[in-house]
Amino acid sequence: MKILCYDLETQPTLAYVWSAWKQNVAPIQVVDHGKVITWSAKWVGEKKIYFGAEWDMKEGDFIERLHSMMDEADAVLTYNGDGFDQKVLNTELMKRRLPPCAPAKSIDMYKVVKQRFRLFHSRMETVAEALGLEGKTETGGFELWKGVMEGDKKARNLMEKYNKQDIVVLENIYHELKGWIKNHPTDGSVGACPNCGGHHFQRRGVHRTKVNVYQRYQCQDCGSWHRERLAEKVDKPHKVSL
Ligand SMILES: [Zn+2]
């Protein structure tokens, strides 16, 4: 399975406003719409971190570069990609009249965290902290975005560092929490753990349905639970003739 881990950074909408509070911004007040300014991506299990920025056109349009990587992916790994990144990227594709990316399964760790745990926050930073993992790069807040929008070189370099660190944290969280992901996409290879591709299983109990009994396993590499696809042969109770 080729799993592409990615993260987008966006800039806010620039608009004329009348006051600091409770603003309704009409379309005519908008000077510049929010958009993607950088992305960072990485194939799970590989070392290289790819990066694209709006201001770096050396290798062509930065969104097109990400688009072609997405086309090669069997699954995409994100933190809130279903709610944010995927739609934001789609919007950039639409603006460029590019077709949708090849269908890939989504592994959204934000959804996994929301569904399976109860943390004070479900932000990536909080999860990393709970796991004792190295966290995000300090941005210094909005100043960084302002600097990037104004073309400041130092700000752009920091944005690159921040964006790249985000997917390192995300991949680490993914590896730590793999056993908690329900319905992890699988390449269908027989006898391998669908979560991690591992081959170390321990038989642990059985899974019962109303009509069948299945052998149950726990993957010793990632901790996820599985059951045999085929039911075990169970001795049918003797028929009692009345
Ligand atoms: Zn596993």
Image: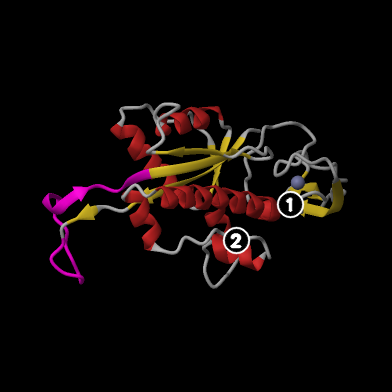
Magenta region, residue range: 17-36
Give coordinates of residue 176: x percent, y percent: 70, 55
Residue type indicated by callout 1? Ser
Residue 3, picture quadrant:
top right
Mark earlier in primary sequence (1, 2): 2
Residue 150 at x, y percent in the picture: 31, 50
Badge 1: few (under 14), some or many (20 or more) residues near its Cα, within 10 Å?
many
Q: Which residue is mark 1?
A: 224
Query: In the image, residue 5 lies at what x, y percent?
Result: 57, 42
- In the rendered image, which residue does mark 2 sit on? 135
Circle 1 sits in a helix, a strand or a loop, which is it? loop
User: Is residue 221 shown left or right of residue 33?
Assistant: right
The x, y position of residue 154, in whole percent, is 44, 51
Which residue is pictured at 31% across the width and 27% down the height? Answer: 97
Indicate yes or no: mark 1 CB to ligand 1 under 8 Å: yes
Q: Is mark 2 within 8 Å of ligand 1?
A: no
Frontmost residue, 60 versus 233:
60
207 and 8: which is toward the camera = 8
Check disc 2 and give the amino acid type.
Gly
Residue 225 seen in the current view: yes
Query: Can residue 83 be seen in the rendering of this structure?
Result: no
